[in-house]
């Protein structure tokens, strides 16, 4: 989720702070992510574009393994990938519900799971889940989005409790 919006800004800020940034995107977002990477490099940062689906467990595991092999560790994970397929609940198709929860909630869980073991071994790390106030208060026409973002709060609280003793901070922003 680094090709535009909040993810773009997070990538640029982390790059400017000295982090080597892996910019994740979908296949159709590669050109936008490459533009963000070019901007990051123009500002003195460094990174690479790594397209994969966050809702595909094997793709996530493979990407994290490749990053660790190339860079030695993952110190920060920002779960920002997200979609919204808005529809009134009674008209929402199963596919719209599944796509939204698979990207917004399952994707965050898969990415977190892929980095947790190496972070635990290193006894350090940061996981930031980008949620939404809609996950706290709901919004008409956004049942799936609201549910996925509310789920991120529960996931965040649980991981924070499980990982705090290993010096891994887990937070959500809304």
Image (cartoon, grey):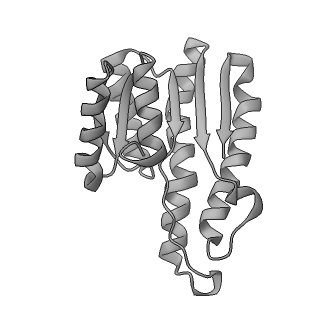
In the rendered image, the vertical position of residue 42 relative to residue 23, given as above or below: above
Against 117, residue 5 (above or below) is below
| 104 over 76 or under it: above or below | below
Name the residue rendered at 68%, 75% in the picture: 140
Left or right relative to 70: residue 1: right
Q: Residue at x 24, y 39 (%)?
A: 34
Nearer the observer, 39 or 47? 39
In this view of the protein, which residue sits in the foreground, 150 or 65? Answer: 150
Examine the rendered structure and indicate whether residue 7 appears above or below residue 167: below
- Please identify the quarter of the rendering in which residue 129 is found: top right
Left or right, 115 with respect to 26, comes to: right
| Residue 171: percent from left, percent from top | 68, 34
Quadrant of res 127: top right
Query: Residue at left 36%, top 31%?
Result: 22
Pinpoint residue 84: horizontal percent, then vertical percent.
Answer: 51, 65
Most extreme residue toward the bottom is 91
User: Whole-percent x and y of residue 82?
Assistant: 49, 54
Q: Nearer the viewer, residue 107 or 58?
A: 107
- Write down the quadrant of residue 167 in the picture: top right
């Amino acid at each position: 989720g680094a090709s535009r919006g909040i993810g773009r800004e997070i990538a640029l800020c982390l790059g400017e702070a000295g982090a080597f940034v892996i910019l994740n995107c979908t296949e159709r977002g590669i050109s936008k992510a490459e533009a963000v990477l070019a901007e990051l490099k123009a500002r003195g940062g460094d990174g690479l574009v790594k397209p994969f689906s966050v809702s595909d467990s094997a793709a996530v595991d493979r990407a994290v393994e490749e990053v660790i092999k190339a860079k030695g560790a993952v110190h920060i994970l920002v779960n920002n990938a997200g979609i919204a397929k808005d529809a009134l609940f009674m008209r929402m198709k199963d596919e719209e519900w599944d796509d939204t929860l698979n990207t917004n909630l399952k994707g965050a869980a898969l990415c977190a799971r892929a980095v947790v073991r190496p972070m635990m071994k290193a006894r350090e790390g940061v996981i930031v889940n980008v949620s939404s106030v809609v996950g706290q208060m709901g919004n008409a026409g956004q049942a799936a989005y609201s549910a996925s973002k509310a789920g991120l709060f529960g996931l965040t609280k649980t991981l924070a409790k499980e990982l705090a003793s290993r010096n891994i901070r887990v937070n959500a922003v809304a």
